[in-house]
Each structure stands twice: as structure tokens, then as C-alpha cells.
């Protein structure tokens, strides 16, 4: 007896596919980014699934604007690497720079900000 369903146990429906059109559109756009620039198809960290295309998409479609937003929140690389994503940040910054309008100085500033965020969040010094 289940309190949530009024005492009736219900089976999960197997005839309904859990399709999300927004997710499908996002995946199509990520695939198009990777097809247009094959360097974006490469994982940003070996052994992890996140590619440059995923992160460029996060900037262009999801309003991500910092490396911490990308590497801590969107693609949680910071949690999966010993350096809290610092090496990945150096790969990602030049990939997303054009979409964010960053010049070399802005990239350097973003990397410094990420290093400070990684130290603050994870206690890992550069």
C-alpha cells in the first residue's frame, strides 16, 4: 500500500518515451558546433564526457559567462580532477573566448578569477 497513490501501487509506464524536445534541440546544436569545428568535439579532460562544444553551447545558449560557471556548475569538471579543473580552464578559456568577446587580457583575467574561485571553493592552491 502506497500513501502517495491512495493505497494503489502503480507500475511505471513503459509505453511512454521520456523525450524532451528542448534536450534534443540542444544536442543537435552541440553536434552542429562540433561538426563545424572538430576541435570542439574533443573532450576537455581525457576520460570525461564534456567537450568544447558542450561549453560553447553553455555560453551561447545558457548564458554561462565565467569559467567557474562552466567547470563547476555546467560540466562539473572541477569535482572530477585533482587540480579542481585548473588545467581544463586553460583549455576551455580560448574555446569560449570568441563567444564571450574575450581578448587575451580578458582570458588572462578569467583564468586568474577561476584560480581564485578554485582556491576558495576547493582549498586547492595553484
Image: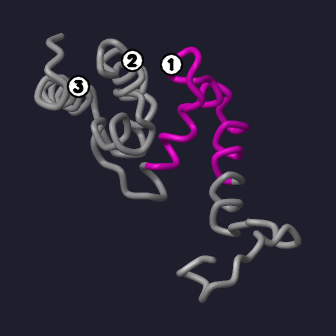
Pointer 2 and pointer 1: residues touching (CB < 8 Å)? yes
Residue at the (39%, 17%) spot, across then down: 81
Q: Secondary structure at mark 3?
A: helix
Residue found farthest to the right? 15
Report the side of 54 relative to 88 (left or right): right
Report the side of 12 relative to 45 (left or right): right
Report the side of 24 relative to 99 (left or right): right
Q: Magenta stretch?
A: 29-58
C-alpha span from label 3 to label 2: 17 Å
Residue bearing the label numbered 1: 45
Q: Secondary structure at mark 1?
A: loop
C-alpha span from label 3 to label 1: 17 Å
Residue at the (30%, 48%) spot, across then down: 65
The one of 56 and 16 positioned closer to us in this rendering = 16
Report the side of 112 relative to 101 (left or right): left
Mark before the other along the chain sequence, 3 or 1: 1
Residue bearing the label numbered 2: 81
Tag count: 3
Residue bearing the label numbered 3: 111
Amino acid at each position: 500500500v502506497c500513501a502517495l497513490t491512495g493505497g494503489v501501487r502503480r507500475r511505471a509506464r513503459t509505453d511512454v518515451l521520456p523525450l524532451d524536445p528542448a534536450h534534443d534541440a540542444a544536442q543537435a546544436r552541440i553536434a552542429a558546433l562540433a561538426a563545424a569545428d572538430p576541435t570542439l568535439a574533443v573532450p576537455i579532460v581525457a576520460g570525461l564526457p564534456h567537450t568544447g562544444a558542450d561549453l560553447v553551447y553553455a555560453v551561447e545558449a545558457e548564458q554561462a559567462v565565467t569559467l567557474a560557471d562552466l567547470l563547476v556548475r555546467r560540466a562539473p569538471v572541477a569535482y572530477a580532477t585533482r587540480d579542481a579543473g585548473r588545467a581544463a580552464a586553460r583549455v576551455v578559456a580560448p574555446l569560449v573566448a570568441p563567444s564571450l568577446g574575450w581578448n587575451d587580457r580578458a582570458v588572462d583575467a578569467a583564468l586568474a578569477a577561476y584560480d581564485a574561485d578554485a582556491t576558495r571553493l576547493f582549498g586547492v592552491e595553484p
